[in-house]
Amino acid sequence: MSLPDPVTFAIPAFVLLILLETILGRFKPKKSNYEARDSAASLFMGLGNFAIGFLNFGIVASVSSWVYQYRIFEIGYQWYAFILIFFAEDLCYYWFHRLSHEHRLWWAAHINHHSSQYYNLSTALRQTWTGGFAGTWLPWIALSLLGLPTPLIVFQKGISLVYQFWIHTEAIDKMWRPFEYIFNTPSHHRVHHATNPRYLDANYAGILIIWDRMFGSFIPEDTAEPCRYGIVKQIASFNPLVVAFHEWVALGKDVLTAKSLKGAFMFTFGPPGWSEDGSRMTSKMLKEQEIRRLQTAQSPPSE
């Protein structure tokens, strides 16, 4: 069965919405903040991802098709397959996304998407060049084993990518409460891109925010604490090569200078920010530090 590519059909809408958001910024700068070099870097990353995707697709499709031979269920393209793939693919996305923040190997492939200090629709185009080679597609292989055909998986992944485009904006405030409870929204995703300690490593959702609520990773946006964007250690560069590979270079240096095999392993598979001497801070450590700071600030002065 042949299914259309949702991303290809959505590209004209992407361009139009970015132009509209840019125009909005002329009148309401707080709702739409663009920087030409930053947007150009995001666009270049998107084009690179599109080109490299052709190389990765053959490998991933081949593995998926091979696994499909050993499928557990005969689902095919039954009507319920389109309902099942919607939820199953979104759950796979959640765990891919969460693992990409919790383990440095995949974080090295994902960090570029968070590297912009601006948050607008062009940020959605800042996609990875190395995720396919790092194996970030592995969670979706479970869908092939379940019995969902490869074209159906690819189609739903496209739907998810298109959906996630519009949530990269500050132009939309919090939405209707029931919608906010079930679906990923700009408010939820702003938290995900924020570097504020309280917001770190939260809201991994693709389409449905219910996974974050179920697995304890949901944090609501607090208007009293505006989101600050980027990464904990900003790269301060608009060079696409730096954006794409800076963390891989840092990872390589850490592994080569590790004092033990355990250190090399943890530098690769441990949480981002882990170090042998404890001189750096992981997200968990930053959160704990912030909690202590707030507790100290709220404590009454001693007499």
Image (cartoon, rainbow, N blue to C red):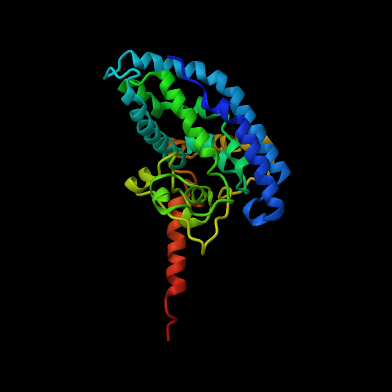
In the image, 269 versus 176, the foreground residue is 176
Left or right: where does residue 163 sit relative to residue 116? left
Q: Position of residue 237 (x, y in %)?
A: 68, 43
In the image, 270 versus 137, the foreground residue is 137
Q: Residue visible at 59% across and 23% down?
A: 52
Left or right: where does residue 270 sit relative to residue 130? left
Could you tell me which quadrant the N terminus lies in?
Answer: top left
In the image, 143 versus 270, the foreground residue is 143
Q: Position of residue 95 (x, y in %)?
A: 39, 37
Q: Residue furthest bottom?
A: 303
Could you tell me which quadrant the C terminus lies in?
Answer: bottom left
| Image-quadrant location for residue 147 | top left
Q: Position of residue 104 (x, y in %)?
A: 48, 39
273 w.r.t. 197: above or below: above
Q: Residue visible at 45% across and 44% down?
A: 184
Q: Residue visible at 42% across and 50% down?
A: 180
- Residue 126 visible within the image: no
How many dots with numbers? Answer: 0
| Image-quadrant location for residue 55 | top right
Q: Position of residue 92 (x, y in %)?
A: 38, 33
- Residue 300 visible within the image: yes
258 w.r.t. 30: above or below: above
78 w.r.t. 16: above or below: above
